[in-house]
Image (spheres, rainbow, N blue to C red):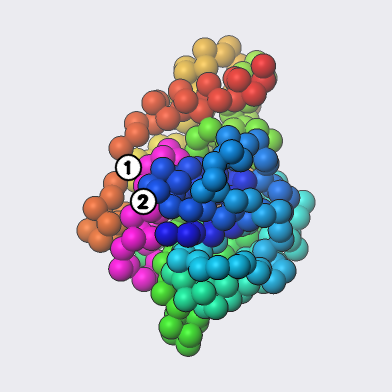
Amino acid sequence: MRIVVTGAAGFLGSHLSDRLLSEGHEVVGIDNLITGHVRNIAHLMGNRAFRFLHHDVTEYIYLDGTVDAVLHFASPASPIDYLQIPIQTLKVGALGTHKALGLSHAKKARFLLASTSEVYGDPLVHPQPESYWGNVNPVGPRGCYDEAKRFAEAMTVAYRNFHGVETRIVRIFNTYGPRMRANDGRIVPSLINQALAGEPLTVFGDGSQTRSFCFVSDLVDGIYRLLLSDQSDPCNVGNPAEMTVMQFAETIRRLTGTRSTIVHKPLPVDDPKQRRPDISLAKSKLGWEPKVELEEGLAATIDYFRALRG
């Protein structure tokens, strides 16, 4: 297939492009590099099956030739981004999704939206199934991301129902691995880089809030299976193995061998207390569940950030 990946120079988009190319597909990667980086796709530049377009997907997307699928992964995706570029975050979720869906409609291509567990907000249901509608503060500091993704889902379903576009929606839970931005503010790169620098590890609140972590290769496998499936309704993809933030910080300390202490800071506004996917649908419809153990994935991620430091 000839597949368009928006956000191709980002963490997830670059790994997804790798997987699609390894499966024999042709990839057209699009990115404006506002949060992505060319080093994530530099290894693909000599690949004849890969083409890169430096373009903002909130503007009209024009491509010659056939397109078989559009995978919309363009979006800032960290708490720091929400505060620094909230309007761009809203625009790529709204206008960018509209333009990407327009390309799918024009080319009669399958469309896959990268949505997020953040559509569930600070959940009142645990673990979170796809049937849960969420508990989101639309005017809080995370609202620009949460509501952009909720709007993107609604737009995707509207194109499916009104225009007959064949659509897929993946709700992505916490994912980690090589190519994450070192300073993106999310828990994995933040704690790893603090540990490698010998700085105190920052834990917000008392650390009793829970998270679950999926290694990027597992996530990409779930996404690829979803793309090829007939599952048109939203589907959670993530790791249901849950742990407290404090337990995670202690794991980072042990794996890096740091002597860093742990310091506590106030919880950010609307920070979710619990985050764990119900992946029953992914298991039954996609035959998917994560395989990479946390310590194995973290070892690869720590090696990546250690190499970045030189």
Three-letter residue code for mark 1: Pro
Real-space CA distance between mark 2 and mark 1, rounded to the nearest whole angstrom: 8 Å
Report the residue marked by disc 1.
Answer: 290
Task: Tell whether position 262 is magenta.
Answer: no
Residue name at image x 71 percent, y 53 percent: 54
Examine the rendered structure and indicate whether residue 61 appears above or below residue 274.
below
- The answer to whether residue 277 is seen in the rendering is no
Examine the rendered structure and indicate whether residue 229 appears above or below residue 225.
below
Badge 2, how many Cα within 10 Å: few under 14, some, many 20+?
A: many
Report the residue marked by disc 2.
Answer: 222
Examine the rendered structure and indicate whether residue 131 appears above or below residue 51.
below
Residues in magenta, as a range: 210-236
The N terminus is located in which quarter?
A: bottom left
Q: Judge depth for marks 2 and 1 and give the one in front.
A: 2
Q: Secondary structure at mark 2?
A: helix
Q: Left or right: where does residue 252 sit relative to residue 168?
A: right
The C terminus is located in which quarter?
A: top right
Residue name at image x 28 percent, y 50 percent: 288
Name the one closer to the observer, 107 or 197.
107
Q: Secondary structure at mark 1?
A: loop
x, y percentage for residue 6? 59, 57
Q: Left or right: where does residue 98 sit relative to residue 255?
A: right
x, y percentage for residue 153? 51, 71
The answer to the question of whether label 2 and label 1 lie on touching residues, with beta carbons closer than 8 A, is yes
Three-letter residue code for mark 2: Gly
